[in-house]
Image: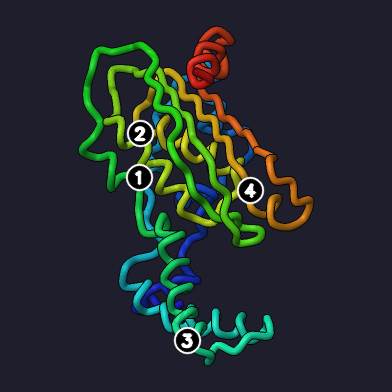
Amino acid sequence: MDPGKPRTLAEKRPVNCNGFIPEEKKEPGTALSRVDKGRSGISTPPVDSWKEERTRSEEDNELNLPSLAAAYSTILRALGEDPGRQGLLKTPWRAATAMQFFTKGYQETISDVLNDAIFDEDHDEMVIVKDIDMFSMCEHHLVPFIGKVHIGYLPNKQVLGLSKLARIVEIYSRRLQVQERLTKQIAIAITEALKPSGVGVVIEATHMCMVMRGVQKMNSKTVTSTMLGVFREDPKTREEFLTLIRH
């Protein structure tokens, strides 16, 4: 590649499931993963990968809107519809702007909302925010899944503004997702930002891909959880968290 030529979007380093730019590959066994560090008892410097780069901007939205709308026109034709009829004249543009909003998490980073909201506090009791509304898009069928997120953490000399937990949920849920990955992303972001003693995240959601198609089970719910630090290691701490979010 010409050194004077800027990288295109396709030539940028790939990002992992959190939208983070991964570290260079290392030989197996040379380092512990972030999740395993807490269980091993080995203390290593934290990696602030929650300060990831955004992968989409407002300028990208404006630039890509015409082609996104054109793609929706193609979809309408492929479904046997006429994009030129009165009721559908503006549908491709509406659908395109709606999809950009549904996936606006690609335009935001955790550091945008957390840099001024982490406070030094001598508090070591569990902090829980439960029943956070969550709306996301299933990456397999591009249909919504909707539910509630429950978050708990044990502070380690630092606390986070309570509304920021909901903002973390918003950033990661407003992307194409699977529920299992979304649960882990939220837990890891809180762990890396606050360095707490432990984090627990539980998500309960209804998936439209199960309700509207496939098995069509109207009342089914999917529950996923991620437990890190003492929430994984100490059964009493984990049970306290799970008990509190049930009430």
- At label 1, which amino acid type do we have? Ile
Q: Residue at x 25, y 31 (%)?
A: 118
Contact flag, marks 1 and 3 (Cβ < 8 Å): no
Ranked by sequence position, the earlier of labels 2 and 4 is 2
- At label 3, which amino acid type do we have? Leu
Q: Residue at x 37, y 38 (%)?
A: 166
Q: Residue at x 47, y 66 (%)?
A: 99
Q: Where 53 falls versus 100 (above or below)?
A: above
In terms of image quadrants, where is residue 191?
A: top left
- At label 4, which amino acid type do we have? His
Whether residue 89 is visible = yes
Question: Can you identify the residue that label 1 sits on?
Answer: 110
Q: Where 144 falls versus 12 (above or below)?
A: above
Residues under labels 3 and 4: Cα distance? 30 Å
Near-viewer residue (211 or 189): 211
Q: Is residue 130 left or right of residue 184?
A: left
Question: Can you identify the residue that label 3 sits on?
Answer: 89
In the drawing, what numbered circle is on residue 51?
Answer: none
Near-viewer residue (3 or 85): 85
Residue 238: horizontal and vertical position, in percent? 54, 15
Ranked by sequence position, the earlier of labels 3 and 4 is 3
Residue at the extreme top: 236
Residues under labels 3 and 2: Cα distance? 46 Å
Ranked by sequence position, the earlier of labels 1 and 4 is 1
Residues under labels 1 and 3: Cα distance? 38 Å
